[in-house]
Image (spheres, coloured by chain):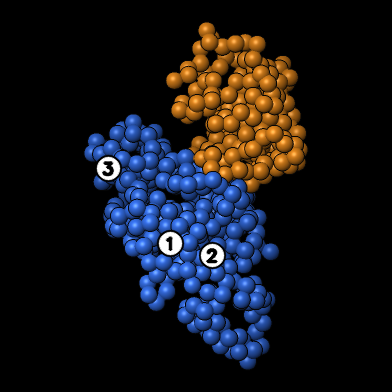
């Protein structure tokens, strides 16, 4: 059974997208970085068969991860109900969004084409993932979907010729990271070079895989960065924050980092609180004669088999 | 840049792989075969070529090979007609009784069998002089034991599970 989706609600949401209203750097900065960090977390958690020893968010890496997540869409989120993506429904939603784009940008369609193409693709990927994993908290396109609903149009590229076509202020990048271009008819085109925090995330995680598995092997960030010959900076702080936020690593009371094993999860304060709450509501449900197991798939699982990584 | 022109075209080569990337599937299984890609930096390609706007003359090839298409193919994009442009381009450069072979994953939105069938149906309903027939086969890694398929960035192996063959007849 596939959960019902209210198409009319989505139609209204799309109709109300304010394409020409505003552009605030902190909006797209944070939402796009979160999108990338979730992309990267899929690589770190699921791509165990690569021989990759370095990572930058190049255009090829971005597209490769997109392809990987869509092609392997049913292998993620193992503790939740898994559906095949609802391809017909997604096509219908895509039509609604495509029509909105065509109406809104009919005057300068050629100029805006790469922006519109990219966000239509993100919109489609969001719904493919969402229809496959309706209860997901880790849809990799959730944050770019929020950006779209806020009225931003954007795309990523590595091609300097393309970047310079849209902005005169571009300063050449020193690494392979993609550049995000964000446009607004009122504010013109702005760009943001993706920073090295993702490269650092990759190396910290790979280091912990080798040296920091489990609470007993926790390592301080200073030690890790020293070993990796990476200077402590705002990027390294950001890297650690994203690894924590995406539940790839945990921190002990001494502020040391480690990749949690199953037994670590059971000891975690958050998990203990969650377990207590769960037992409380299980008791309540019993009193009200509600069978949680039928309503929520997770409840039928033994909580001790929770995975270390959320998706 | 490896630009195509008639002077550097060996017409005895009747097969072409589009969007080959760093791969050499066509060269291994459909030899002799040109490898082409839109990315001119790929070292192993013979010609730089955009798969939806190729530089080749009409009726140039007997077989077109495409492995794991991504961002081109049978999925509707900003223009809903894009898959039809793509099919028309394939049909233009292929000979009568030629074929297009697509190796891909059933979850790949650019070559999902249902999408291919739908787009071929639209093409057949509107074309007067060309007719396309489609054959879909399940495949596993054992079908191509000497070959490793990779995702676009080349970092990770992927395991295609469908082989789609489109046969082209022209009158």
Display colour for chain B: orange
Image position of A307 (left or right of B133): left
Looking at this rendering, what residue extends furthest in the top direction? B7
What is the distance, in whole Å, between disc 1 and disc 3 at their CAs? 34 Å
Q: Position of residue A117 (x, y in %)?
A: 45, 41
Q: Report in which chain the residue with disc 1 lies.
A: A
| Residue at mark 2 shares a chain with residue at mark 1 | yes
* 3D distance between C-alphas at marks 2 and 1: 11 Å
Classify 10 Å Cα crowding around label 1: few (below 14), some (14-19), many (20 and above). Answer: many
Place of residue A249 in the rendered image (x, y in percent of width and height, measured from the top left)? 46, 65
Give the residue number, with chain letter if any, for mark 3.
A188
When the figure is inspected, residue A31 is found, relative to residue A244, above or below; the finding is above
For label 1, the residue is A243
Chain A palette colour: blue
Query: Could you say which quadrant of the image residue A77 lies in?
Result: bottom right
The residue wearing badge 2 is A309
Determine if residue A296 is in view: no
């Amino acid at each position: 059974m596939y959960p019902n989706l209210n198409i009319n609600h989505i139609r209204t949401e799309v109709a109300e997208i304010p394409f020409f209203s505003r552009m605030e750097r902190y909006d797209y900065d944070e939402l796009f970085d979160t999108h990338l960090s979730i992309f990267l977390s899929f690589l770190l958690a699921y791509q165990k068969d690569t021989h990759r020893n370095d990572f930058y968010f190049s255009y090829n890496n971005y597209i490769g991860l997109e392809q990987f997540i869509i092609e392997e869409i049913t292998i993620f989120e193992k503790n939740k109900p898994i559906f095949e993506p609802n391809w017909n429904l997604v096509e219908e939603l895509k039509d609604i969004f495509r029509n909105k784009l065509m109406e809104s940008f009919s005057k300068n369609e050629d100029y805006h084409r790469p922006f519109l193409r990219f966000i239509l693709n993100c919109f489609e990927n969001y719904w493919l993932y969402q229809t496959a994993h309706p209860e997901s908290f880790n849809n990799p396109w959730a944050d770019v979907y929020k950006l779209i609903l806020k009225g931003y149009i954007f795309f990523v590229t590595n091609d300097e010729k393309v970047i310079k076509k849209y902005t005169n202020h571009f300063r050449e990048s020193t690494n392979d990271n993609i550049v995000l271009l964000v446009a607004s008819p009122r504010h013109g085109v702005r760009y943001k070079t993706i920073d090295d925090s993702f490269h650092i995330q990759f190396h910290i995680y790979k280091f912990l895989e080798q040296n920091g598995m489990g609470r007993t092997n926790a390592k301080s960030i200073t030690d890790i960065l020293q070993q990796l010959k990476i200077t402590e900076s705002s990027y390294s702080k950001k890297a650690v924050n994203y690894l924590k936020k995406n539940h790839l690593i945990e921190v002990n009371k001494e502020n040391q980092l480690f990749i949690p094993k199953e037994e670590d999860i059971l000891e975690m304060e958050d998990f203990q609180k969650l377990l207590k709450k769960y037992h409380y509501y299980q008791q309540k449900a019993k009193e009200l004669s509600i069978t949680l197991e039928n309503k929520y798939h997770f409840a039928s699982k033994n909580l001790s088999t929770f995975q270390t990584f959320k998706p | 840049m490896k630009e195509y022109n008639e002077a550097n075209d060996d017409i005895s080569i009747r097969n072409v792989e589009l969007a080959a990337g760093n791969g050499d599937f066509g060269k291994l299984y459909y030899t002799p075969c040109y490898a082409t890609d839109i990315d001119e930096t790929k070292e192993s390609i013979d010609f730089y070529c955009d798969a939806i706007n190729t530089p080749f003359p009409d009726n140039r090839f007997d077989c077109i090979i495409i492995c794991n298409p991504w961002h081109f193919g049978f999925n509707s994009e900003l223009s809903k007609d894009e898959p039809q442009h793509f099919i028309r381009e394939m049909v233009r450069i292929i000979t009568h009784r030629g074929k297009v072979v697509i190796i891909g994953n059933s979850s790949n939105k650019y070559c999902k069998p249902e999408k291919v069938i739908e787009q071929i149906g639209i093409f057949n309903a509107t074309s007067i002089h060309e007719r396309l027939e489609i054959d879909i086969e399940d495949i596993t890694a054992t079908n191509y034991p000497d070959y490793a398929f990779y995702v676009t960035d080349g970092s990770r192996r992927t395991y295609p599970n469908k082989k789609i063959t489109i046969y082209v007849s022209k009158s």
